[in-house]
Amino acid sequence: MAIITYRQALHDTLRDEMLRDENVVLMGEEIGVFEGSYKITAGLLQEFGEKRVRDTPIAEEGFVGAAVGAAMLGLRPVVEIMTINFIMLAIDQIVNHAAKIHYMFGGQSRVPMVIRTPGGGGQQLAATHSQNPEVWFAHVPGLKVVAPSTPADARGLLKSAIRDDDPVIFLENLALYNTRGEVPEDGPDDVIPLGTADIKREGKDISIIAYSRMAAVAVNVAEQLANEYGIDAEVVDIRSLRPLDRTTIVNSVKKTNRAVVFEEDWRSYGVGAEVAATIQEYAFDYLDAPVRRIAAAEVALPYSKVMELSALPTAQHLVDAVRATLAASGGARRNGGIVIPGLAGVARG
Amino acid sequence: MASNGSARSGSGGRAAAQGGGRTSTASRKRNAEPNGHGSAETDVAATAQSPTSLRGRPESREQLIDFYRQMVLIRRFEEKTGEMYTRAKIGGYCHLNLGEEATVVGVMSALEPRDYVFTNYREHGYILGRGVDPNRVMAELFGKETGVSRGRGGSMHLFDAEARFMGGYAIVGGQLPLATGAALTIAHKGLDEVVVCQMGDATTNIGAWHESLNIAQLWNLPVIFLIVNNQFGMGTSVEKGSAEPDLYKKACAYRMRAERVDGNDLLAVRDATLRAVEAGRKDKAPTVLEAVSFRHRGHSVVDPDRYRPREFVEKGRSHDPIPAYGRSLLDAGLLDENGLKQIDDQVNRIVEASVAFADESPEPEPKDLYVFDFASEVPNIDRSLPGDHTGLADIGGAAALGGR
């Protein structure tokens, strides 16, 4: 086990996979000479050369589509889109081509490629550089979409994404690049299957369901809840938005009987909406309170620091939502007692 | 059945209902200034008078006759396709190559089996020109399991891996980045294959055109951007859609080889394609090849074609490449009238057989709806159906958890 940053985990995994398979090539804006806008690809041009680390013109439709075509003939391109805000320019190639080619040609062709791209707000980058439109891709059959929250998950999911024969949208978050965490040694154990959620913290009282940066925040909030309020929260890291691991989510809620969804994208029609719908479909009888959703305000994110902060979900929002959910359902059960002050709940065995 | 939507690959939207009298296409002569090749004019009539002579050609007699056979096959196949569409055997959108056969066969005949082809949604003729069994093509149009795309693609999404026919694509310009990327893999692996990327004239106005040409020239990729300029993008004439109506000149901005050719002259198209292929193989140089062509009917099967000036249509139809090429064969003494008729009869039998095959072929099974959803299996793929009230049967087993 080594403790490294999320950035380092991505860099090392790209390098390892390029060493492992000569068909893995990198493409994107400023990934070579400039070493990447966020330095994920630092040093790779020197090591692998221009054929495998290819700087592209600023033309997302052109180079993402070229990666799709290259994948159809057997390369395994890993495309970096500088930030997810520029992915809109490539949506036709992703949604109308990459996602459909295997199916609409009756299985005769496949598109083994990865699109890595960071999103997220909170950096005062203003409306067109602070978005989380991942649900657009999570909605599309034919795509796989993952959003790791830790260095270990970044490594394990990137390995799977590169080795997978379908197009994978690999969502990073600007605020996660410098976060640190334990990463297992190289080997079969550090490969994480796409399509699987992960329990980041076990708990009995409530399920907090999140992904990407919000899953990382949720883990910290869960510790705070335990220390300050005696609330034992379970943190479910969705990790894979498509396929969605409904089983892990639902089983968690069946155990805790309560759920809060915590997400950085917009609330309306967001990832949390799908999660909440899933919970009521499969665990309705187990719920002791309505599922609450914490999400971003429905605005184009403002530049002003104070305004931006008011529009984004925070740890405090999550603390409040968890406490309110417990209050609405009789509080946490501790040996038949209630730990939330001022509540007279009924403990059920 | 065909909806009246406004998708650009359809017939609704901008088309029709305008009546005639729209801007007529220019019949003024334009002196081509391509990068070193051929003369060019948009006036099809002027060039169709003097097609490339069959005398002294490098091709064998059999090859020259086979070009005719292929054109007739496409013509009959497309006529039959139109007929089957009106009989509701074929659904969706359906775009025919009628009138463009010389361009199709001229280009396809210049390729080797190792080369790749990407096209737009007007591609029936191209896949036939690639040598794919007409039975399987017609079966795809009928939506059958025996079709080239197993009934999943239809008219606009034909594909055959063996023939390296890499698909018809129904988003205008969508195939250009794909073809460019295919050529990237070829260059990356140091192979001497080339990629042909066919498109219509209006595609030169979309962003993917510019981005793809730029990348192809920057990276020296062996791709041939074939513009089939039938002078109308749906109902909009080239002059109304493109600030530079001499489309091949648009390659100049990318310093790319470019050539314009009379699309009714099969051998001229073939020769221009052979030059482009050689540039691709030897120098990894991309090419823009513009074939000035004409479609005999509307944009799609259900387009009544009211927007093209009558004179333009009559003139276009009068310069039909197939009889013209047939006469060339007669004049060159390669074939007699009886020989032409034998080819017609043979082709008619092939096309009739394709309809019978398609008709008798099984429909795809609804139970196979999720076959081909992903190439790599991973956990938790949702394969629910509209009637499933929950996508998964009893997650986790309520009984195991003791229920409530």
Image (cartoon, grey):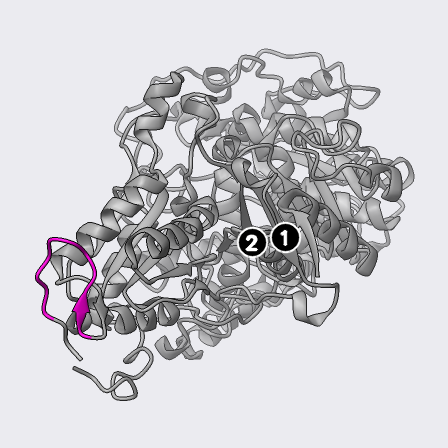
Report x, y in % for residue A186.
75, 63
Image mark 1: chain: A
Front residue of this view, candidates A87 and A220: A220
Front residue of this view, candidates A345 and A294: A345
| Residue A216, above or below B231 | below
Residue at 43% x, 46% y is A217
Q: What residue did someone put label 1 on?
A: A113
On screen, residue B24 versus residue B398, left or right, reads right
Q: Which labelled disc corresponds to residue B388? A: none
- Total numbered badges shown on the rendered structure: 2
Front residue of this view, candidates B165 and B267: B165
Sort mark 1 into few (<14), some (14-19) or many (20+) by Cα contacts within 10 Å.
many
Q: What residue did someone put label 2 on?
A: A168
- Residue type highlighted by circle 2: Val
Mark 2 element type: strand
Residue A274 sits in quarter: bottom left
Query: Quarter of the image containing the C terminus of chain A?
Result: bottom left
Image mark 2: chain: A
Report x, y in % for residue B30.
65, 12
Q: Which residues are magenta?
A: A336-346
